[in-house]
Image: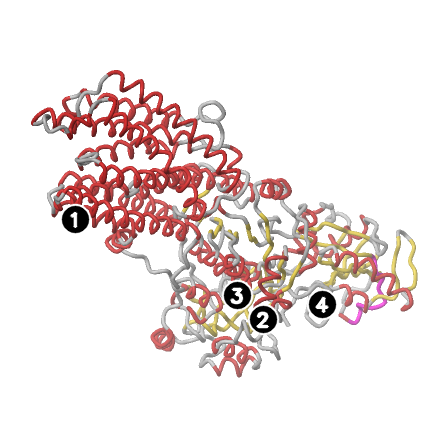
């Protein structure tokens, strides 16, 4: 069985999945079958030989099995990409309005709406492509060229030309190019962390391996594509390639269509809300104007203009510019955003799922403890471990390097290597014999129970005692304590021999003295404690999803200050019903010994429960989870397949970077919500104003060109929103889409604008004499003037109130005093309000049907603006207290 050389800890492989979530595939069964055969039979079974394939046979196999390449998400062309963007309901609505406007002669409307579509779609296309190209450049790697035996000679070939039956030569630093069965191995250690999340190395061998339960990762003589060789040499026969490998099967699943994220669902919900609202509004206005005025063409033109005015055509642009600004800011913080929409999801995350390896921990093995059998630190234990690692002649693995890195001894002058007894799977230990102070000392290092088996004495300080069976239980207590703390433990023992004895064998590994233990661990990052506290303060709950065992995971969480209320293993999840599974997923903080599919299931259940889930991982085993989450987060040093599945790629694997990104995502979403709330409430209020005015007035309250101009000026005033400041209290918790809350805001805030619209109607009709329009004695030019005066009065009031009120809505605080907008937003507001004041007196205003307003009008409007702002702020404050909302 493939196992770490450390005892007592569960093997560093995936937990066996239950039969329901995991069915052994035909390719896995083939690998298991090959691994259970003796080497000659296995080679024959695949039509190969110990000297490899002949070139002609390899070419035939290449035709039969195809190239050894992974499935990739099909990249779409520019045309298809643009068409997909044009299929957005909001864009379709705008396209329809533009076409109808052109057909009925409203060319200005058609051109301007067309420009809006071009800018919003074009801008999002350019920015998305730029982000994608940045990640593609990041992921480019020189293709690996493994060494294989072809025509009885060692030959380098592209990894894509590897075929089943090839004999691959492996050494330290090699990447396993396919799923293969070892036919020879010497001191061969591999890292499967990219597949399992387990940072400790595994030793592999070429012996026949019987596997009763069919779980391939427990095969000691199998290596899997994507893992890498740490030390030793080996030869392996390729069994599966391409998508038939474990790695390849994951990459194939990544090509499936991704489910909608919370941002996609939120935008779509708001868009359809506006479309339904606009459809009802336009139909009502069309019928009212047609019936009351008797001119159905004029009714259609007016209704279409209302449709243009009610459509939040700036939404795509506001969203894209907000997201692009967020992406630019995040790039300065060493974060590459692949998909712009993921920025908002980033800010909405309320649960962050992450593997521990490399995120909470440093992703390398260090020697942390060297103790005698009583648990006291022992320099002598460290020195003997150092001698063992220093003098072993095989390629040094991670364990040896960790020991040698812990201390530096000048052994060259004091010691000489006499002999060596290499590691093997039966003994599970390795020994060296060194000459020291006139004696030959045999020093063994290995699995604790195997070291116990060859010892009959133990040492505490300078005293040696007999190792009786009755006290062995007491001696085991320290090992159990280290194991329960998550350490990987090795035993150290020694025996002295006469200096004239030069040749040793494994029979000499007996009657030894147990000296103590060395314990290894993947230490937590220095920044982990601070980062976890920061994420907790930001309202983000962290859940650990790991392939490692629960003991190690508990210790890591304890060290970084992560409180664990409940821990659950993959084996436990296998036996739960659907309802219990969902309950446990919600309650547990740590999930250990998970398979990739179980990680994916956990994330899917959390999303179904209404959470916005982020997942951080960089291994092949993380790819499905990255795809399943609302936001998949990988790192530039991660596996290419992980980066392909991710939405965001970090140039620095740090939770602190995540916390900064989450805050930026919340800023982006908060500013998007400002526009959405403003558009929804403004449109709802305009509905009452337009329908009432259309029914009560003998003329149109505004002509189509005035509505369009008003709409364009207002839209321009909103372009400052992406740069706006965001109140700090909005950044302390996740921001999520809440269409119900937006509807309520629209219902309560929207009608306030209608109050002042009707006040303006009354002002123009009664105070400024527009009611004379109905006087039969008023005819000709004066009648037209009265109509234009009324329209100008409402045009100005509508533009000024809409433009100013966003400063009230943008914050829960008292605007201008407790919360100030950004300078660009203040600047655009002042410019548009100044244009609104200037237009009635300009020659351009005349072309729009506007006329000069009496000076006293501005006193009334100033009073309206002040009253409107105060009333809106009071109702807004009441609304948030009653309904909450972001």
Q: Distance between the residues labelled 3 and 4?
A: 33 Å
- For marks 1 and 2, the one nearer the N-term is 2
Q: Mark 2 points at which residue?
A: 17
Above or below, comparing residue 52 to residue 530 in the picture: below
Quarter of the figure with residue 191? bottom right
Q: What stretch is highlighted in magenta?
A: 507-515
Quarter of the figure with residue 9? bottom right
Q: How far apart are marks 4 and 2 (CA)?
A: 28 Å
* Image position, residue 640 (x, y; %): 44, 56
Q: Mark 4 Cα within 10 Å, few/some/many (few <14, many 20+)?
A: some
Q: How far apart are marks 3 and 1 (CA)?
A: 48 Å
Q: Name the residue under label 3.
A: 597
Q: How far apart are marks 4 and 1 (CA)?
A: 78 Å
Q: How far apart are marks 1 and 2 (CA)?
A: 57 Å
Horizontal side of 348 relative to 697 (left or right) equals right
Tag 2's secondary structure?
loop
Does the CB distance between marks 3 and 4 fall below 8 Å? no
Q: In the image shown, does 281 or 648 lie closer to the viewer?
A: 281
* Image position, residue 776 (x, y; %): 11, 29
Q: Mark 4 points at which residue?
A: 428
Above or below, comparing residue 145 to residue 883 in the picture: below
Give the residue drawn at x 43%, y 65%: 253
Q: Name the residue under label 1.
A: 99
In the image, which is nearer the foreground, mark 3 or mark 1?
Answer: 1
Tag 3's secondary structure?
helix
Q: Distance between the residues labelled 3 and 2?
A: 9 Å
- For marks 4 and 2, the one nearer the N-term is 2
Does the CB distance between marks 3 and 1 fall below 8 Å? no
In the image, which is nearer the foreground, mark 3 or mark 4?
Answer: 3
Q: Residue furthest front?
A: 776
Q: Mark 3 Cα within 10 Å, few/some/many (few <14, many 20+)?
A: some
């Amino acid at each position: 069985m493939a196992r770490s050389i450390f005892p007592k800890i569960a093997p560093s492989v995936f937990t066996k999945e239950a039969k329901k979530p995991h069915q052994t595939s035909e390719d896995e069964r083939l690998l298991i079958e090959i691994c259970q055969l003796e080497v000659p039979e296995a080679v024959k079974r695949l039509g190969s030989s110990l000297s490899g394939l002949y070139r002609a046979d390899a070419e035939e196999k290449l035709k039969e099995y195809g190239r050894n390449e992974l499935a990739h998400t099909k990249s779409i062309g520019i045309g298809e990409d643009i068409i997909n963007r044009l299929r957005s309901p909001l864009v379709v609505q705008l396209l329809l309005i533009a076409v109808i406007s052109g057909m009925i002669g409203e060319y200005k409307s058609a051109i301007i709406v067309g420009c809006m579509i071009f800018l919003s779609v074009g801008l999002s296309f350019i920015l998305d492509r730029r982000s994608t190209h940045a990640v593609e450049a990041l992921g480019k790697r020189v293709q690996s060229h493994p060494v294989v035996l072809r025509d009885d000679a060692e030959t380098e070939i592209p990894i894509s030309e590897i075929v089943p039956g090839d004999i691959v030569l492996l050494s330290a630093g090699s990447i396993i190019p396919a799923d293969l069965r070892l036919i020879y191995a010497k001191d061969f250690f591999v890292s499967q962390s990219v597949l399992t999340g387990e940072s400790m190395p595994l030793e592999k061998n070429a012996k026949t391996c019987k596997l009763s339960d069919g779980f391939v990762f427990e095969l000691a003589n199998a290596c899997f594509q994507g893992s890498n060789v740490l030390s030793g040499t080996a030869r392996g026969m390729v069994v599966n390639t391409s998508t038939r490998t474990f790695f390849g099967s994951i990459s194939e699943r990544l090509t499936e269509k991704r489910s909608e994220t919370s941002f996609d669902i939120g935008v779509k919900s708001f868009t359809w809300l506006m479309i339904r609202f606009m459809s009802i509004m336009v139909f009502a206005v069309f019928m009212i104007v047609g019936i009351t005025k008797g001119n159905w063409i004029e009714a259609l033109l007016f209704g279409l203009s209302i449709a243009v005015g009610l459509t939040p055509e700036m939404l795509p642009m506001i969203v894209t510019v907000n997201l692009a600004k967020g992406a630019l800011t995040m790039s300065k913080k060493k974060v590459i955003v692949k998909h712009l929409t993921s920025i908002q999801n980033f800010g909405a995350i309320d649960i962050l799922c992450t593997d521990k390896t490399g995120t909470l921990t440093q992703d390398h093995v260090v020697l942390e403890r060297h103790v005698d059998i009583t648990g006291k630190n022992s320099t002598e234990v460290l020195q003997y471990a150092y001698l063992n690692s220093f003098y072993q002649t095989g390629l040094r693995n991670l364990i040896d390097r960790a020991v040698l890195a812990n201390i530096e001894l000048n052994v060259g002058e004091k010691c000489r290597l006499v002999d060596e007894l290499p590691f093997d799977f039966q003994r599970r230990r390795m020994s060296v014999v060194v000459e020291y102070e006139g004696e030959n000392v045999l020093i063994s290092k290995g699995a604790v129970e195997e070291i116990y088996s060859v010892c009959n004495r133990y040492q505490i300080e300078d005293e040696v005692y007999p190792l009786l069976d009755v006290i062995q239980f007491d001696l085991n207590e320290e090992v159990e304590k280290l194991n329960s703390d998550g350490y990987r433990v090795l035993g150290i023992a020694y025996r002295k021999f006469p200096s004239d004895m030069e040749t040793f064998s494994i029979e000499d590994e007996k009657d030894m003295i147990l000296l103590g233990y060395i314990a290894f661990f993947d230490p937590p990052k220095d920044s982990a404690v601070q980062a976890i506290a920061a994420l907790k303060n930001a309202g983000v709950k962290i859940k650990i999803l790991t392939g490692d065992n629960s003991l190690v995971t508990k210790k890591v969480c304890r060290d970084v200050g992560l409180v664990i209320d409940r821990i659950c293993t993959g084996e436990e999840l296998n036996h739960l019903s659907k309802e219990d599974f969902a309950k446990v997923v919600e309650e547990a903080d740590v999930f250990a010994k998970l398979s990739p599919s179980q990680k994916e299931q956990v994330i899917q259940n959390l999303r179904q429960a209404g959470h916005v889930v982020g997942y951080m991982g960089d291994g092949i085993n993380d790819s499905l989870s990255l795809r399943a989450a609302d936001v998949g987060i990988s790192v530039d040093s991660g596996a290419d397949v992980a980066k392909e599945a991710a939405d965001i790629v970090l140039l620095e694997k740090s939770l602190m970077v995540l916390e900064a990104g989450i805050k930026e995502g919340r800023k982006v979403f908060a500013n998007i919500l400002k526009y959405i709330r403003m558009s929804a409430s403004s449109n709802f209020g305009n509905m009452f104003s337009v329908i009432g005015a259309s029914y009560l007035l003998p003329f149109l309250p505004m002509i189509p060109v005035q509505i369009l101009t008003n709409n364009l000026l207002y839209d321009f005033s909103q372009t400052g929103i992406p740069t706006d400041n965001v109140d700090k209290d909005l950044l302390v918790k996740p921001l999520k889409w809440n269409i119900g809350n937006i509807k309520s805001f629209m219902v309560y805030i929207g009608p306030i604008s209608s109050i002042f619209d009707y006040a303006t109607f009354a002002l123009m009709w009664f105070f400024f004499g527009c009611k004379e329009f109905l006087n039969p004695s008023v005819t000709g030019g004066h009648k037209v003037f009265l109509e234009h005066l009324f329209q100008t009065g409402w045009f100005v009031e509508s533009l000024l109130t809409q433009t100013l009120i966003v400063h009230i809505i943008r914050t829960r605080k008292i605007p201008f005093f407790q919360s100030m907008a950004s300078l660009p937003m203040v600047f655009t507001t002042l410019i548009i309000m100044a244009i609104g004041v200037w237009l009635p007196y300009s020659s351009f205003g005349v072309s729009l049907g506007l006329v000069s307003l009496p000076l006293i009008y501005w006193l009334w409007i100033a009073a309206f603006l002040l009253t409107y702002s105060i009333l809106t702020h009071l109702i807004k404050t009441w609304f948030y207290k009653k309904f909450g909302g972001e």
